[in-house]
Image (cartoon, rainbow, N blue to C red):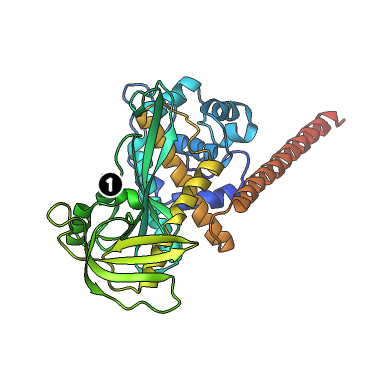
Amino acid sequence: MPRSLSPKKIYAVRSLKQFCQPLASILPRTPRLESRCNRPLQMEFEDQLNALIYFHLEEHTSGRHLIQTLNEDDYARENIAPPQGIQKSSFFEAMRERGLEQFMFVFQELQKKACTLLPRKFPELGQLVAIDGSLIDAVLSMHWADYRDGVKKAKTHIGFDINHSIPQKIFLTDGNSGERPFVDQILKPGQTGIMDRGYQCHQNFDRWQTDEKHFVCRIKAKTKRTCLENYPVPSGSIVFYDAKVLLGQPGINQTKQPLRLVGYQVGGIRYWVATDRFDLTAEQIAQIYKLRWDIEKFFAWWKRHLRVYHLISRTQHGLMIQILSGLITYLLLAIYCHEQYGERVTIKRVRELRNKILNETRAAESEHLGSADQNLRQTQNLYASP
């Protein structure tokens, strides 16, 4: 039978059990991972997920580093690795060929659970989703990761739930793939996508309005605009322009549906933001676009502290599994930090969790060894009796 992610062999580590608790109701519903031959799997899905969460949580630097830990560290060998241990070939084969459906299912279900547990930060602004792409340095043998001559890169396209401060959707492509097409796949009707200038497309602005998908998108300052109606701007506000407009050159690329254009200035920089949200004030539109920075902070934190982009696999399948396991780890951290401390994810709390796991492991190991010594002494006394 597959093991759950909570340790249940020699060392009962309470903090790790608390951390993984949200998965308890998801794993039984996860599609079963089947062997492709008559031989049983050396690594069940739960073992693969367990190992990769451990990889991110403990900041391992490579797949080889992880495998060495699983084979040599007492706690990892007894509680994280498969019962019969794991060989390097079996681990990397699993990364290349198996588990993608299961990892995607766990990520999607855990994301839904996090949305029900975490508080909404800006309910008055609606469902906000920041959308952006992030490049991943690849190696030349990753032929699928086209970027330019002599350079290979992959790209993640992520929708980030601003209200709950968690990732919502993820797609992986080569580094040359455009980012605009993924807006339609990330954004749901009723949600508001927050995007930078790279997503400006007047045809998309029209289609999103038809599909009832809202947007707040920065546009180029020199974009041609035809003003249909000016709105008053409060004195002393950062906002200097607010109007209903048509964007683009008439007869060439002009929007067919009118939208709202808000101009505001912060730190000497002028921002022009196009949106279909007429229900909010201009200051709220400016606030929404400033919240786009949250996805940039997420990318930076996620890469730096969870080792998400330290390549374990060079296939697109394997890299997607690695990224999904990093997102799952982040979601678990978000739930853990909220339930234990009422806070967002910080590296301070992550380090604190790592230290708790280490201290509890040492204490449990000491208790286990002490019990073994006591049993040995009792046995020796028994044989020493006249």
| In the image, residue 314 above or below residue 325 | above
Residue sitting at the far right:
386
Query: Eyeballing the image, is 62 above or below 215?
Result: above
**Is residue 207 rendered to the left or right of residue 114?**
left
Q: Position of residue 190 (x, y in %)?
A: 26, 63
- Tell me: 166 left or right of 223: right
Pick the residue in front: 89 or 368. 89
Q: From this viewpoint, is residue 162 visible?
A: yes
10 Å crowding of disc 1: few (<14), some (14-19), many (20+): some
Q: Within the image, what quadrant is residue 380 found in?
A: top right
Q: Residue at x 16, y 63 (%)?
A: 257
Secondary structure at badge 1 equals loop
Please indicate, yes or no, whether residue 1 appears anywhere in the rendered image. no
Residue located beneath label 1 in the image: 180
Give, as a three-letter code, the residue at label 1.
Arg
Q: Which quarter of the rendered picture does the N terminus lie within?
A: top left
Look at the picture and state if 364 lies above or below 249.
above
Q: Tell me where residue 166 sits by quadrant.
A: bottom left
Residue visible at 57% across and 53% down in the picture: 346
- Tell me if 165 is positioned left or right of 170 in this view: right
Q: Nearer the viewer, residue 64 or 257?
A: 257
Name the spot of residue 320 as percent of width and height, x first: 38, 36
Give the x, y percent position of residue 243: 27, 71
